[in-house]
Amino acid sequence: MQQTLRTWVSDWMQGLGAVALLGREAFQAVLKSRTPWRELLYQVYFVGVKSQSVVLITGAFTGMVLSAQTYFQFHKVKMDTATLAVTGVSMCSELGPVLTALMVAGRVGAAIAAELGTMRVTEQVDALRTLATHPVDYLVVPRLLALHIAMPVLTLEAIGVGIGAGYLVCVRLLDIDPTYLWANMLRYTDVPDLLTGLIKSVVFGGVIALIGCYKGLCCGEGAEGVGRATTEAVVYASITILISNFFLTMALGPLLAGL
Amino acid sequence: MIEVCQLRKGFGTQTVLDRVDFSIEKGESVVIIGRSGCGKSVLLKHLIGLLMPDAGEVKVEGQVISRMSERELLRVRSKFGMLFQGSALFDSMTVAENVGFAFRNRTGLSPSEVRRRVTEALEMVDLRGIEEKRPSELSGGMKKRVGLARAIVYQPEILLYDEPTTGLDPIVSDSIDQLIIRVRDRLRVTSVVVTHDMRSARRVGHRILMLHGGRIYAGGSPQEIFASPDPVVRQFVAGVSDLKTVDS
């Protein structure tokens, strides 16, 4: 039992170190202008445009259910018009970035790990290296930058759609006064809430890209290896998003409070 | 041109290469033979720095590549072209994009010049008019030819072939052998071919090295290897599981 735990911790630390080194290598490549622009454009399209439906549906229904649940509780203490304020703050600082990141981790993180894993087992990554191309420059950098660019946009969309859908539920289904509802939402949802969400989305984008790329580039042999890499990329990225979200909230709260 | 000194490589508890020593002269065509799983491809990947040795070193034109970082190796690798066992074509690209990939980072070449060189390389491997096809639309033999075109398009000094005829029928295998000889003679490249196809080894090599038990077990001209009295060499050359069959 102790041995298993020791191995697990050692593997986890080793993985964390490897992801950090991959991040450093990618960051240096970006600074030295080694970004393949055509690939980056395609990845932004793949991450940003192709994830629209998933993110919009998630954002809309999260905003709707959050508004409904908040209303059921607030109605007991006659605070109906504060319902959308809770939805606004929650969507901006927590649910918007976290749920968008989890959905993107499932869609894009898995795709990255599967694509790079297949390239590795079919020697396409080695072929890249023999053609004097660094895999980090060609494969990791465009994916990392694409997620850094697309994630804040997707998160903003999820927040907007979530609040909009929540507003419709409150006004059309729950008969809450729209003027006070909207005024309270604007009053309690501040710029720091939105900034918190956007900063988190950039961090989560990096987490999804780096874990997906690392798992793909280091995957085991054969179909089983690719399958395992894909599953691990989604699981590890999701767990890292949830854990880092807590620490980001604790760090960004006091930091942005003064704004 | 290439020097391998006391090379050792293991995976886990298994030692695959154990103090391998040999050198290859400029313009020479060397064939490395050996049984499946004896470490031929592992050895080949060390020559281009795709794998790093546990001990020993690999020198290319006097430079010790086995101590270089991945970025330093990129410069050395521009001297090399490599044909992979499974061709390793980029399946998200067309044939023309695959063959012209090496020019992606090279400034000073216009798109029309790149197109011309791609067409020239494809013509050299007897493939015309397939520029816009995807690798999934090609047969095994065609994939190998495209892989070879990709390896020679930027006129490297050293060409590495990893099992170039494996999985191909005898006629396609023969055409690949002819291509290797044509590329070797026309471009005057140093060639290293890893194979267990003895017909191919006899034809394309100036010298044959046999890898056995993690070491270079035997070496010499094709005539010497095929006439070798050594039982291990004879068994492999004759392709029989029981040595008594060879003697009879």
Image (tube, grey):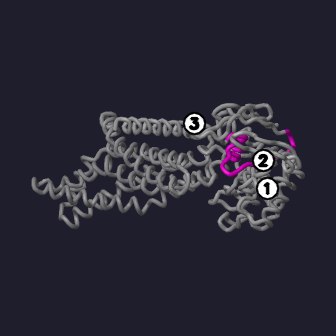
Q: Chain of mark 3?
A: A
- Residues tagged 3 and 2 counted as in contact (Cβ below 8 A): no
- Read off the residue under disc 2: B231
Q: Quadrant of residue B75?
A: top right
Residue at screen point 80% across, 54% down = B247
Q: How many marks?
A: 3
Question: Residues under labels 2 and 1: Cα distance?
Answer: 9 Å
| Residue A25 x/y as whole percent | 56, 37
Whether callout 2 and callout 1 share a subunit is answered: yes
For disc 3, the marked residue is A28
Q: Earlier in the sequence, mark 2 or mark 1?
A: 2
What whole-number distance in Å separates the C-alpha atoms at marks 1 and 3? 60 Å
- Say if residue B150 shows up in the picture: no
Span shown in magenta: B25-49
User: Does residue B176 appear to the left or right of A226 in the view shown?
Assistant: right
Residue receiving disc 1:
B246
Tag 3: residue type? Gln
The quadrant in which residue A42 appears is bottom right
**Residues under numbered marks 1 and 3 in contact, where contact means CB atoms less than 8 Å apart:** no
Few, some or many residues within 10 Å of mark 2 (<14, 14–19, 20+): few
Q: Are the residues at dot 2 and dot 1 in contact (C-beta closer than 8 Å)?
A: yes
10 Å crowding of disc 3: few (<14), some (14-19), many (20+):
some
Q: Secondary structure at mark 2?
A: helix
Of the two numbered discs 1 and 3 in the rendering, the one whose residue sits closer to the viewer: 1
Question: What SS does tag 1 mark?
Answer: helix
Quadrant of the image for the N terminus of chain B? top right
Q: Quick one: SS at disc 3? A: helix
Dot 2 amino acid type: Pro
State the image coordinates of residue B77 (x, y, percent, origin top left): 73, 42
Image coords of residue B238 (percent x, y): 79, 55
Closer to the observer: label 3 or label 2? 2
